[in-house]
Amino acid sequence: MNFGSWRLSDYEDASATIGADYRPWFRYQALANLTASNFRKQGGQIRCYYLEHERCYFGRQKSRDCMKVYTVSDVHVDYAENMDWILSLDSSVYQNDIMILAGDISHDLGDLARVFSSLVTKFQSVHFVPGNHELWVEDDQFDCSVEKFNAVQALSAEHGIKSGVEHYGKLSIVPMFSWYDFSFGEPDRHLSRAWRDFRACQWPSHLESSKDISNYFLELNRDQLSVKNDTVISYSHFPPRIDVMPSYIPEERRRVYPVLGSASLGEQVKDLNPDIHIYGHSHVNQSIEIGNIRYINNAYAYPTENRISRKELRCVLDLAV
C-alpha cells in the first residue's frame, strides 16, 4: 500500500473503519508522510509532537526500544480518588520512560513523599517543579513559603526526583520555577478575597509583592536558559503566556487570569526556545503551537473537573533509544 500518495482525509477515513487500536498508527503515518508542522525530521527519525486527544503512536503495542516522555499536573492527591489513580499506575509499562510532574501534587509533604516513592519505582526518571499548593504553609510546620519550597526541593532530592536540568542523549529537560505576577491582569475584589494563596502562603519581608515573588523564582532559572540540544522540553507549573488559554473560556471564569502566570516567565521560555513547554495550574488542558514552541497542559484536576481535563497521563514525545 502506497501511503505516500494519500491525503490526510484518506487516513482519517481509513482509521474510522479499522478500530481504536490501530488509529494512532494511521494518524502517525498520515502526519509523517504529509510532513505536517507537528513533526520534525532529524537524524533520520521522525518525532511526534502529539495533538490533543492522541496517544503516542502504537500506544502500548509499540516496541519498548524507545523512551517516551509523559506528563501530568495538578493531581491534587488530597482527593482520595486522585491519590488512588496515581498510585495505581502500571509498575512495568513505563520503566524506560520519563515522567514530568508540573506541580500541585499536594501541600502535604507526607502525601508528596508517598507519590514520589511510588513513581520512582515505575519510571526511569521523574521530574518535578512545585506548584502554588506545595508552598502553602497554612496549618503547617513552616512559617515561610520559601522555607517550604526548600523543604520540597530537599524531599525531591531525597526520593531521587529530578528538579534540575537533565540530559538524555539528544533530549534535554529543563525545569522553570515561577510564580504569578499580575502581568495577566489585576485581581478584582472577589479574587483578592477568595484566592487561597493570599492566606495560605507567607513570604519573607523582602518579597513584598507578587512581582517580587515571581522575580525570586525566575532568578533561579537564569543559568539554564542557554541549554541546547536536538530536542528540549521545558516545564513550569504556571502558564508562561495568557494566549495559551482557550478562547472558549467564559468571561466570568477569566477573573482568575491575574493569578495564572507570568509574562516574564514567557520571556524566559522564548529565550530558551524549547521544542515543547509543559505547564499546569489552569486545570484547562491544552496543546497549542505558538511561534515554534508547542505548549502543553495535561491537568488531572479535581474530581468534578471532567470536561476540561483528561484524567490520564499524556505522552508528549517518543524517542528511539
Image (tube, rainbow, N blue to C red):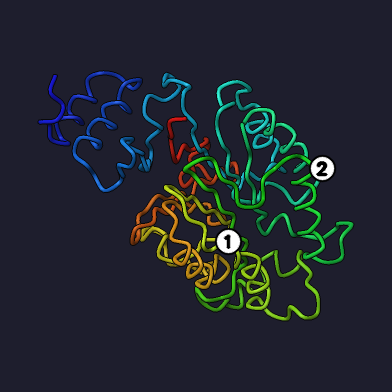
Residue 233 point in image, percent of width and height: 49, 50
The residue drawn where x is 47% and y is 55% is 228
299 in relation to 45, above or below: below
Asked whether, in this view, residue 305 is left or right of residue 57, the answer is right
CB-based contact (under 8 Å), mark 1 and mark 2: no
Asked which quadrant contains residue 100, the reply is top right
Local SS, label 2: helix
State the residue in front, 86 or 187: 86
Q: To which residue does mark 2 refer?
A: 110
Dot 2 surroundings within 10 Å: few (below 14), some, or many (20 or more)?
few
State the residue in front, 144 or 49: 49
Q: Measure how far apart labels 1 and 2 are at the Cα level.
A: 30 Å
Local SS, label 1: helix
179 in relation to 313, above or below: below
The mark nearer the N terminus, 1 or 2, is: 2
Q: Tell me the kind of residue under disc 2.
A: Gly
The residue drawn where x is 64% and y is 28% is 122
Q: Which of the two marks, 1 or 2, is nearer to us in this view? A: 1
The residue drawn where x is 42% and y is 48% is 230
Q: To which residue does mark 1 refer?
A: 224
Asked whether, in this view, residue 256 is left or right of residue 285, the answer is right
Residue 30 point in image, percent of width and height: 22, 33
**Mark sitting on residue 255:** none
231 in relation to 2, above or below: below
Q: Residue furthest toward the right?
A: 141
Residue 276 point in image, percent of width and height: 44, 51
Q: Tell me the kind of residue under disc 1.
A: Gln
Quarter of the image for the N terminus: give it.
Answer: top left
